[in-house]
Image (cartoon, coloured by chain):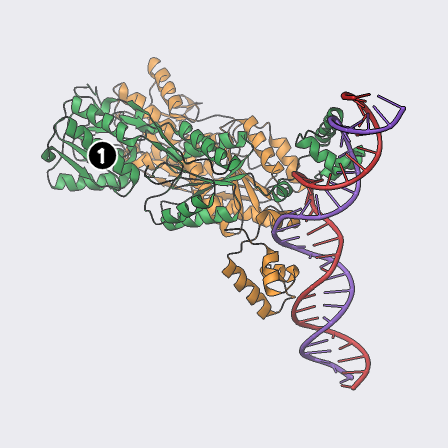
Chain colours: A green, B orange, C purple, D red
Amino acid sequence: MKHFTIKDIADKLNVSISTVSRAFNDKYDIKKETKELVLKTAKDMGYHPNPMAKSLSKKRSSNIGVVVPEFINEYYSEIVIALQNFLISKGYQILVMQSDEDEDQELMNVQTLINNMVDGLIIAPTRGSKNMTYYQSKVKEGYPMVFLNRIETSIPVSKVVFNNLKWSFFATEHLIRQGYKKIYHLSGYKDLSVSYERIQGFKKAMKKHHILEDNYKIIETGLLAKEGMEVIEDLIFHHDIPDAFFCVNDMVALGAIKKLKDNGYRVPEDVAFVGFTETRIAELVTPQLSSVKQPTYEMAKKAGELLLKQIENKNTPIETIVLNGEFTIRKSSVKGSTTDLL
Amino acid sequence: MKHFTIKDIADKLNVSISTVSRAFNDKYDIKKETKELVLKTAKDMGYHPNPMAKSLSKKRSSNIGVVVPEFINEYYSEIVIALQNFLISKGYQILVMQSDEDEDQELMNVQTLINNMVDGLIIAPTRGSKNMTYYQSKVKEGYPMVFLNRIETSIPVSKVVFNNLKWSFFATEHLIRQGYKKIYHLSGYKDLSVSYERIQGFKKAMKKHHILEDNYKIIETGLLAKEGMEVIEDLIFHHDIPDAFFCVNDMVALGAIKKLKDNGYRVPEDVAFVGFTETRIAELVTPQLSSVKQPTYEMAKKAGELLLKQIENKNTPIETIVLNGEFTIRKSSVKGSTTDLL
DNA sequence: AAAATTACCGAAAACGCTTCCGAAAAATTC
DNA sequence: GAATTTTTCGGAAGCGTTTTCGGTAATTTT
C-alpha cells in the first residue's frame, strides 16, 4: 500500500500536476468536468495529499499549539477535547503540551511549538508572570496567539476568561443567605489571576452583606487536595473552624472535607462547603458538593475561533471574551438539609 | 523576527548549504572546525530548522500518533503525559486523539493520523473489535504500531498490557480473606478485554477458595459512576445486596457506594468495596477506597520504546509486555475497621 | 469574419531541507 | 616527488506540493 502522489494521478489522466492541484484547491481556472474526474480518480486510488509538502509550499503547517498547565484534572481535559474537536473540523491539527504547573516548562513548550512552526498558539498559562513579556512581544510581532483563563484581563492580548469575580460572588452570597455567619475562603495562590478574582468576588459579597473582617478569612492554599487538608489541620490546631468554607476548587474542598470528617466534624451540619470548577465527583461524594461550573466547551470554542480569525487575517484587533457559568447547589452548602444516614 | 534558513547561514559563512546541513546532521564528512563554526553561527542567528522541509526530504514526519478512548479520567491523562515526555525527549512530537469510547471515531482518528503521515501509532483501543482486522493488516504491511491496554494478548501485534487477571485475583482474594462471604463483581463490559480478564481473576479467586456459584455474581456494568448506581438500584429492589463488591474501576465503585449510602447502608460495615485503576480521589472519599494501581508511566514508556524500536528498525519481531501494579488496602474493604465518626 | 475576451491548462520555479556524486585539497604511501 | 588514498566540500537533484506566467483553444463581441 504505497502512497500515491499528485504526479501519479496526473500521469494516469494525462494531465499536468498543476491541473490536479487546481482540482484539490478548487481554483476557478479549471473545467468542472476535469475537476470532478480528478477528484474521483484520486478518491478511487486512495490518494491523500502529503501534508508536509503542502505545508512547505504553503508556508503554513495547519498545526496549532495548545499549552495547558496540566490535564490531570477534568477541566483542562475537557478544554483540550473541545479545542481538538473544533480545530480538526476546521482542517487543523493540534499539538498539546502541558507545563506541569511550571513556568519554565511552559516557556519551553511554547518555544518548542513555535520552532515546530505552529500557525498559532492557545495558551492557558500556569501561575507566575515571568513569561508574559516574552508572550507580549510575540503578540506584537503578529504571532497569532490566544490566552485562555488564568490571565489578567488588563494584559493586551486576545483572551477568553471566565467571570470568576461574578460567580465567586454568587457562590459566597449563597453561603451568606443560607445563614452561615463565619465564612473562610481557601483561595489558591494569590498570584494566580483566577484566585485573585475569586478573592475579589468573595470580598465583594462580604462587603455587600456587611460582614466584618473578623468574621471572614482568606487563606491562601494551593490547588491540590493535600493543601486543603493541611489548612484544616492548622485550623483545627488553632480551634478556628468557621461555619462554612468557599474553596478555590473542588479538590481543595474535598481535601478539607476529608480532614474535617476525620476529626469528627459533620458536613454540612457543622461546616458547610462550596467548591469551584465543578468536577464529576462533586455529585458522587457525601455530601454532594455545591460548585460553580465553567463552560469548558464554549471557552475552548471561543478561543479557537479567536485564533483562527487571527490566523486568517493578521492584525485583527485584540479581543477579550468573558464567559459565565452555572452554580449548582447541593447538600454540602444547604442549611438544615437532612443528610439522612450520611 | 524572520525565520532564517539554511541558506542564510551558508551565505553568511561562504559555504554551501550541503555543508550546513552536514553540520546539523553530524555527518562524518565535515571538518570539525567548520561544523562547530556552522553550529555556533546558527545558534547566534537564532536559526531553527524548518520541520516541514526536513520531513519532506527525509520522508519521515517525526510525529507519532496516539489514540486513546478518552482522557477525562486520570488514567489516560497520565499515559498521554508520560508518552509525551518520553517521545519528545527522543525528538518526536505527538498527535493525540481521543475516540470518545466509540469504535467508528477510533477508526477515523487512526486514519486521520495515518493520512497525516505519522511515523507510527500507539493505540489504546476502545471496546469492540470491528477495527482489529484493519489494524492487523496495517501491522502486516509493516506500519509501526503498538497497542496499549484493552487488547487480548492473543492478537498478533506488539502490545503493552496490565496483568489484570493477576491483580484482580489479588483484590478478590483480599476480600475473601477479610471474611466476606458473598462477593459481587461489577465487571464493566464483557467484550472489553480488560474486563474479561478481571472477571477471570475474580473467578479464579472464587475457585481457589471454594466459593460456590450461589455466593458470587458477576454483573456487567459500564465504566461510569452512573452505571454503578443503576446496578445498586436494581439490587436493592431485589433485596440482593452482598457483603462486598469488587468493581471494574473506581468510578463504578464510587457510584455504587453513593447509592448504597443514600439507601442507608454503611460502607464498609454493611458492604465492603474494592475498586481498580486507582484514582487520586480514592483516598479522599469516605471511606477511603481500596484499589489496584496501574503503572501508567511505565506502561507508556514501554509502549514508546517498543514503537521507536519498530520505527528505527522495521521487521523487529512482535512483542508483548505485561506489567504489574500495586494493591492498596484502605478502609473500604477492611472488616472491623472503626470508621470513627464516618 | 476578424478582433477581443475568456476559459482552461502546462511548464517551471519555489518552499527548505537531505543526500548522492564527483572533484579539489590535503594527507599518506611508496 | 609521483601516486594513491583520505578528508572535505560544492553542485545538483529530489521530496510533493502550490502558484505564477504564458499560451492555446474556445467563446463572445463588433
Report the side of A331 relative to B24 (left or right).
left
Which of the pair A271/B162 is nearer the observer?
A271
**Crowding at label 1, few (<14), some or many (≥20) Cα neighbours within 10 Å?**
some
- Which residue is drawn at the image coordinates 19% and 33% (left, top)? A203
Above or below, comparing residue B186 to residue B51 in the picture: above
- Which residue is drawn at the image coordinates 22% and 34% (left, top)? A200
For disc 1, the marked residue is A200
User: Quarter of the image containing the C terminus of chain B?
Assistant: top left
> Residue B339: which quarter of the image?
top left
What is the three-letter code of the residue carrying label 1?
Gln
Mark 1: secondary structure: helix
Report the side of B216 relative to C20 (left or right).
left
Which of the pair A212/B46 is nearer the observer?
B46
Percent across and percent down for residue A80 are 44, 34
Report the side of B103 relative to A9 (left or right).
left
Chain identifier of the residue bearing label 1 in the image: A
- Which residue is drawn at the image coordinates 14% and 26% (left, top)? A209
Above or below, comparing residue B25 to residue A313 in the picture: below
Percent across and percent down for residue B70 are 46, 32
Q: Tell me if I can see residue B181 in this picture.
A: no
- Which residue is drawn at the image coordinates 36% and 21% (left, top)? B229
Report the side of B135 relative to A261 (left or right).
right
Which of the pair A6/A159 is nearer the observer?
A159
Percent across and percent down for residue B147 are 55, 39
Percent across and percent down for residue B230 are 38, 18
Q: Tell me if I can see residue B179 in this picture.
A: yes
